[in-house]
Amino acid sequence: MSKEQANFFTVIVTGQVEFADIPGCDNAYCKYAIVHGDDWTHLDGPEDGISQITRMTSGGPDQLLVWNFPVEVTYKSTNAFGWPQLILSVFEIDALGRDVIRGYGCIHLPICAGQFTRKVPLYKPLSASALQQVMSWVSGRPAEFSNPKFPAQGEGREVTRVQSTGHASVQLNVVTKDMATFGYSEVK
């Protein structure tokens, strides 16, 4: 009996957005989105999601915004170009009940099988002018990206001014199948 050759390789990712450390942020929720190139096909699991609102943990020096928000997705492809990226958007609820951006972050999903914990730097865009900065302070609406998937794109980022706001922790478990068939080494 001959073994059938695979027509694609598969990448399965499970895990969770564990927490964020954002100084000065008392409550927040997290949105995630996974984007990928044209050669990739989504097979299973949600490609985006929104967490519950969490309050900063009390006590101790490490006061974190804990979500433990699950991520589970499966893709197939024949080409590594456009490898999937996880985009995080963290929003705080202000005193008037408005959603205020506290940080964006983006990482590529790990490229080999295994268990990984990734620290995702979070940042927010700055206003383009002093007048816009004053207006955003008065209105309580800081600058934010019109496209929440912008952090995963290369075009236009070189002229975007940002400010670091903290980091998030993401724990991911990755399983790959048939990558060697397409010339990609599978680290064991």
Image (tube, grey):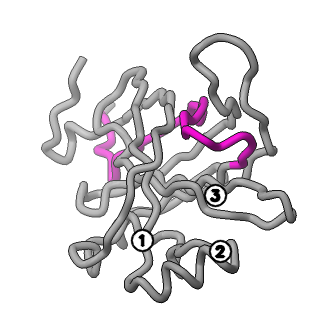
Q: Nearer the viewer, residue 168 or 77?
A: 168
Q: Mark 3 sits on what residue?
A: 48
Looking at the rendered structure, the secondary structure element under dot 1 is loop
Disc 1: CA contacts within 10 A as few (<14), some (14-19) or many (>=20): some
| Residue 132 relative to residue 118: left or right | right
* Of the image marks 2 and 3, the number of the one nearer the N terminus: 3
Q: Are marks 2 and 1 in contact (CB under 8 Å)?
A: no
Task: Indicate the quadrant containing the N terminus: top left, top right, bottom left or bottom right.
Answer: top left
Q: Mark 2 sits on what residue?
A: 141
Spatial CA span between label 2 and label 3? 24 Å
Picture coordinates of residue 166 (x, y %)?
A: 46, 41
Looking at the rendered structure, the secondary structure element under dot 3 is strand
Picture coordinates of residue 61 (x, y %)?
A: 58, 14
Q: Mark 1 sits on what residue?
A: 126
Q: Residue furthest right?
A: 96
Disc 2: CA contacts within 10 A as few (<14), some (14-19) or many (>=20): some
Quadrant of res 110 = top left
Quadrant of res 114 = top left
Indicate whether residue 18 is drawn in magenta: yes
Residue at image x 63%, y 58%? 48
| Residue 80 relative to residue 115: left or right | left
